[in-house]
Image (cartoon, rainbow, N blue to C red):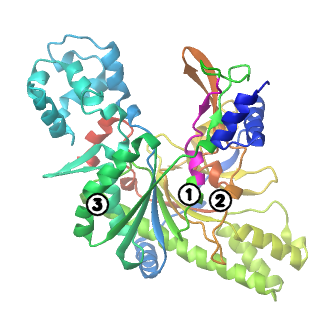
Amino acid sequence: MHINHKDLLQLKSKGIAPQEFERQIENFKKGFPFVKVQKPAKIGDGILKLNKKDIETYKKLYDDYSAEVLKFVPASGAATRMFSFLFDFLEKGGDHYSSISQIEQSEVKTFFQNLKSFAFYDELDTFIKSKNQSLEELLEECHFKIIIHYFLLKEGLHYGDKPKGIILFHKIENEIRTALEEHLVEGALYSKSSKNKVKIHFTISPEHINLFNEHVNKVKGKYEKLYNVSFEITFSQQKSSTDVVAVDENNELFRNEDESLLFRPGGHGALIENLNDLKDDIIFIKNIDNVVPDKLKSDTINYKKALAGLLIKYKMKIHNYLVQIDEGNLDTSDLKEIATFIKNELCFVASDDIEEFTIDLQSNYLKHILNRPIRICGMVKNEGEPGGGPFWVKHKDSHIDLQIIESSQIDPNDSKQQQIVQSSTHFNPVDLVISPINYKGIKFDLIKYRDPETGFISKKNKDGKILKAQELPGLWNGAMANWNTLFVEVPISTFNPVKTVNDLLRPEHQ
């Protein structure tokens, strides 16, 4: 594979080392191995279920705990996919209709039948009035493409290119909120550090930094006054050093018209780099579009605090064991207690019978397992929503532990593996509470705890040509593969994502 001087300069400008570039090419050639799932994690077998007493106990533990807390919200990219069916209608739909019922595409029909129920209706109505037209009249006269034009495109509200965080999600009585505002409210309710400071970090695209800054400056004071807090809002962007080169179907470098190399973002797994730059003791992770109005927030608040309390409980226990190991003086029964904890509570099944090791070897091995970042992952009952799920996974060295696995990581032609997937009961709503700080108060280097063999290769189309794209190990999949992990069932009421604009019509968002 030939690379020239310009290619090397391009790699250097992006911060990609030649060895990393070579590894990316090798991944295209070899592909990524499928994961071997042993069984789905279920209640009592890898997934904890909290009762009311547990929830109150862990909430109190969290409320009484003094720590630097942060809310981490992946919010990169435009919301274009939310409106894909509207863009499709703009391109392929008819120009003349006599009624909404004539629209063949059901999603488009639903959108227009319920247009007044969206939080952005008044904003759209006001804009169209500024053009000396009436939204109601355009609806009555079935000028659907004109409405979409004003709604999505640059000459109008430009929603088709806005980030999800800035889109108006909810209208309750006379108050209208964006997804970002709902995260500010959530932060004020469960993510406070000392002196009522609420720290929230959004990962965003570089082209949206001004939009986010303007919006935060506009609304921050309102919520600080309402909840008696002070917000510390920070942003970061996906690093260009995490981009991945593209190749053609023959694994030859895919080049742009100017002969430069084509690079593509490495997927949300690249955000482990952003997370690695943060130094807070407890970090909540939740996607930008998974928010609800205030009337439904109580379950979210209760379970977020409970998961954080559970994290604190296990963090303290693990750190206590690590201090004991460092101090020495552990006998066989002490080591057996720690090994049992790792197996039964951290759900890490060692590949060897460590009781056959010397005491020193046992201590070192147990310390190696305990001294890792910790994550508590909420899991919801599977009700048909897409997404990865919780499984027991066997690794190359034959140890077994808990992992969040996407369907793309499992061999579609292996009937036994597919049967295991079909028997799963829960899926991953991206509801995590993590601690990246070790028992000595030093932050882990999270990059060292990735599994580089859990990436994904897909085919894309650019300018009529097929290319192969590569995604890094997913943020909550391979990027956190070597963490101590606990799964906890959380109610479906805490999971209300907005993947398409019509999801905002669900009762939970009205």
Label 1 to label 2: alpha-carbon separation: 8 Å
Q: Which mark is residue 275?
A: 1
Is any atom of residue 159 visible in this view? Answer: yes
Position of 32 with respect to 390 (left or right) is: right
Q: Nearer the viewer, mark 1 or mark 3?
A: 3
Q: Which mark is residue 220?
A: 3
Residue 345 appears at what percent x and percent y? 64, 69
Answer whether residue 263 is magenta in the image.
yes
Answer whether residue 455 is magenta in the image.
no
Which amino acid lies under the numbered mark 1 shown in the image of this protein?
Answer: Leu
- Residue at (66, 22) in percent of width and height: 254
Query: Circles 1 and 2: CB distance less than 8 Å?
Result: yes
Which amino acid lies under the numbered mark 2 shown in the image of this protein?
Answer: Leu
Label 1 or label 2, whichever comes before in sequence order = 1
Looking at the rendered structure, the secondary structure element under dot 3 is helix
- Residue at (25, 25) in percent of width and height: 148
Residue 280 appears at what percent x and percent y? 53, 69
